[in-house]
Image: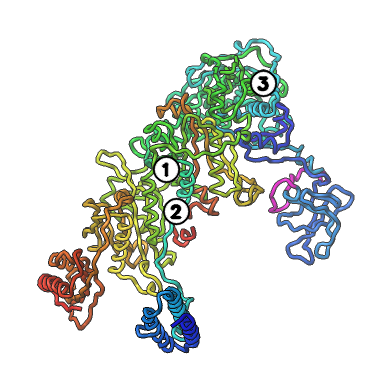
Amino acid sequence: MDIKEVEGLTAQALSELAGAADGTALEGLRVKYLGRNGLLPALMQGLKDVPAADKPALGLALNRFKTDVTAAVKERKAALEAGTRPALEAGFDYSLPGRWPRQGRLHPITQLIDRTSAIFRRMGFVVADGPDIETEYYNFDALNTPPDHVSRDLGDTFYLPGGLLLRTQTSAVQARYMEQRQPPVRIVCPGRCYRRDTTDATHSANFHQIEGLYVDAKVSLADLKSDIDHFARELMGPAVKSRFRAHFFPFTEPSVEVDFSCHMCGGTGCRVCKQSGWIEIMGAGMVDPNVFQMAGYDPENVTGYAFGMGIERLAMILFGIDDIRRLYENDVRYLAQF
Amino acid sequence: MKIPLSWLKEYVDFEDTVEGLADKLTFSGVEVEGIERLGGGVPGVVVGEVLGIEKHPNADKLTLCRVNFGGPAEMTVVCGAPNVAVGGKYPFAPLGVALPCGITIEKRKVRGVFSEGMLCAEDELGISDHHEGLMVLDAAWAPGTPLAEVLGPPETVIEVEITPNRPDCLSLLGLAREVAALYGTKVKVPDTTLAESPPAVEKATSVVVEDLTDCPRYTARILQDVKVGSSPDWMKRRLEAAGIRAINNIVDITNYVMLECGQPLHAFDQKLLAEGRIVVRHPKPGEKILTLDGVERALEPQMLVIADAQKPLAIAGVMGGEHSGINESTTDVLLESANFRPASVRATSKKLGMLSDASYRFSRGVDSELAEFGSRRAAKLICELAGAKVLKGVVDVRSEPRKPQTVVCRPARLEALLGLSATPEDIASLFESLELKVRRHSPEAIEVEVPSFRGDLTREADLIEEYARIYGLKKLPPVRPMATIVPGADDKPAQAQARLRAVLAGLGLQQIMNYSFLADRLLDLFDKDGAPARVRLANPLTAEHTVMRDALLPQMAETIGLNVSRQVSEAAFFETGRIFRLGPDGRPSEEDHVAIGLFGPVGRTGLDRFRAVDEQEMFLWIKGLWEQAAAALNLRAVKLRPADRPWSAPGRGMEIVVDGAAVGWLGLLKAEIAKEWRIHEPVGLLEAGAKPLVKDIATIHGLTPLPSYPSIRRDAALIMGLDVRHERVLEVARAAAPPELEKIELFDIYQGKNLGPGRKSMAYAFTYRSPRGTLTDEQANGFQQLVNAALKAQLPAEIREG
């Protein structure tokens, strides 16, 4: 036995395999060459009679014989099967409806809370929470709302027996959080709020807000602007910008209203932004010194910013929802689209 | 508030377009909500009178109108407006006129008939978006009168929204001060020099103020020989552009001056006043007043009235009375310019449901130093426009005037708060542009005296805000946003709740969201006994929303009902939300809950979904869903105990127990309740506290090593009574089996005639494994015999081995 002989046998085997007409013939050839009593074991057996010097080369040749023939068997088998498949499975219909248990979905409001929270988390904020039922102190007093402010009216706020109320803003969480911790504070508070509004296409007596608060030794209005700019880009798209308009809130000074440039038209004016190119998104400002004082912080040593926005409003803008009531109607055919 | 621009320009100069002005005001805190253009007309457009109308021969919706427009001949015009009428007067564009909408009028055929001009709608004239029909003009105008004459001179009106902290801006002068600061110009204050005549006012009247807290200041001037008549056109036009109806010169002047400087004024006919004098007091019991709007109002003791020697004349700061006002025969006017406590006016105005321009301003606060200015200004105008003479001096009753406030602003603080740097000189000069008097300034501090009209500026932060908004918020320097980690702050509870929602959605449930309040009726359906502990709204808005929910399931069932009524054939929902209850101490508490609702063939895939769902199957789905959720949430030691709820079908309710504590319930909805929404198929429900479900969310309970030896399986079919439950089989088998029994799996249930009535066959696979070596067939057979013997004797059951 020498290398030439082995190579000749390899060529012969490959040629026979290529000609195998069906599975039976192929199996016969496999047994003939690779089977327990086939050619390969016989040749391996013969290797022990070969001179030591020739052994490595011949061993390699026999190995090549084995791998080549094995691969050829596999290849021919696949080819034969591919050719016969349609005949074997005539009833197969790939177009039948697929079967797998359904996947559920989160409510669009939850989706937006998660999305906004995720952006702020990446910026180092943590999510904080507080009760829906609040005291006048946390909902109003601690936020520097004057005792006779209109927002405290029975016409605007839902009251409960015992001087309690349903929080009208998630800012109430800020006051609670600051009371329990020393600065720095960097939180967002998503949550449910209530206002005594007659429900219509754009108002809901029960709604959600997300509130942010950052307090540290040196936080400025310019920091607020750059952080909000970042949030605007992350939420609405890389081209979206924010702008500040001076405004008034009891709990911040200075106070601003924040517009985002319209994500639909890029600021040129369209139906979504009512032709203005800008959409009002949130209220914000620098935390009023009185709010710090009530929380037990020294306004001489810390500054901070706060912002808040309505989730339903954001959902309507981002998802193109025309009527806020759809969000609480819970028709599965509507919700499943988000 | 509506601001006619030509009027504003009387008090301040600025070089800008109206849009530019609107932009500057809006960004500095006075939001411009709209810009409206009035008057002006279109060159060439005149009044046209329609003399006759005929049908267009070739078009149903068109008419042929003969129009007289003051020209030498009548014109025939094709018109499509629905509101055209014979004798009507409309804007008419003759041939050759170019309209703002882009049309130039030419003689041309419309459906075969020549049209010689055009009758116009408002949008075609660029007056508004209105296109419902022709613009109808007053019948008094002669045909041919230029439209510009009809509409008056052009005027631009901006509508502004003033925030509650800036009552000083509820006037043209206040706004002019803002404009002056924004454009670096000066306010031109109107002249108030009076040519007074004897005798002194004190001879003619007197004022007593009984409550100087509610009325810190009351001034009265007397004007005699007043000729009441109509105001000049320029004044009427300005008032109307600002949204106030012109009445007569005296009332108009009080309104004009209020708009001009912000001081509400009231003019009394002094001859109608008992003893001709004023008493400011609280009403006596039972006193009433007929107000200017013709309504008789009962007065309450805490309100404040302006009275004469006998009777109330006006409700202070809210509205005047019917019987003391200016009328055609008035000759002597007592001019009130006063100040009232904001909270008092607000309360009275609210109580009576009366809102006036005066009460709006007083509620927000009027500068008490303004009373004298407003009075002088109005008196001067009454002298000029109503031929009156003003008596010498003024009766001025007041509490101690407030001392001028001084506030300090430190540039370093300003820089820290705003993130922009400014020199002390820049800051001082900006403050001066707002009419704040700079008392002293150094690199460390700028001290200013705040004018009386800026009562909102009491602290350093207020001054810093002034700087920011006038300097320009658009000019804040860009800063790189920085993520800042606060050591020790985490939000694991929020993450756990998010994980819970993700698990439930992953199990195929759609999240829903219902209101936190609802009506008792729905809650009662599910648990009547819970009613006393419910948290009630003290001031509900509607009868639908009166009480806080004490459970999530009622709305869950209602939501399923809504979907069923809309032909939705299956629903798998979850809701996470808060429930509210009164504790034993009567204080409300709240708790996060989770609810699940299933309806229809939700647990099946493919064509199986078209078979009806029975109670057993629905029950197994809600139970299986719970088991899956519990596993995904890493809960161990989870048990279900049979326990019916008021809402569950008898024998179909289970209590959920985690680590020995009851955390919720699951089961099937009672048919009587399901009927409410015409649901006639099984509904699976679950409600539990959310906190106990997420307690192990981040726990790994210790790992079990993978087995080293193979297992061996033995099957057995048990034929037994229908009343023997699966759990009993497990119990008996486990008790009898050696520790090598690894698991028991049910793989078939069968009921059939061949088994006989009341019998069933349940087939189980028993898996055995030893940690010490491979089990032999003989060993496995031995184990199974032990199990079989126990099952046979204790269930009892007949056994067919597999």
Residue B569: mark: none
The answer to if B397 sits in the magenta stretch is: no
Task: Please tell me whether residue B711 is drawn above or below residue B445 in the rendered image.
Answer: below
Report whether residue A79 is seen. no
Residue pushed farthest right?
Answer: B72
Subunit under mark 1: A
The percent position of residue B74, horizontal first and vertical second, equals 86, 53
Which residue does the numbered mark 1 point to in the structure image?
Answer: A127
Q: Which residues are magenta?
A: B126-145
Image quarter in which the C terminus of chain B is found? bottom left
The answer to if B130 sits in the magenta stretch is: yes
- Which kind of residue does numbered mark 2 sit on? Tyr
For image coordinates 44% across by 23% down, the residue present is B284
Quadrant of the rendered image containing residue B647? bottom left
Which residue does the numbered mark 2 point to in the structure image?
Answer: A328
- Which kind of residue does numbered mark 3 sit on? Arg
* B288 or A95: nearer the viewer: A95
| Front tag of 1 and 2 | 1
Image quarter in which the N terminus of chain B is found? top right
Label 3 SS: helix
Are marks 2 and 3 in one subunit? no
| Front tag of 2 and 3 | 2
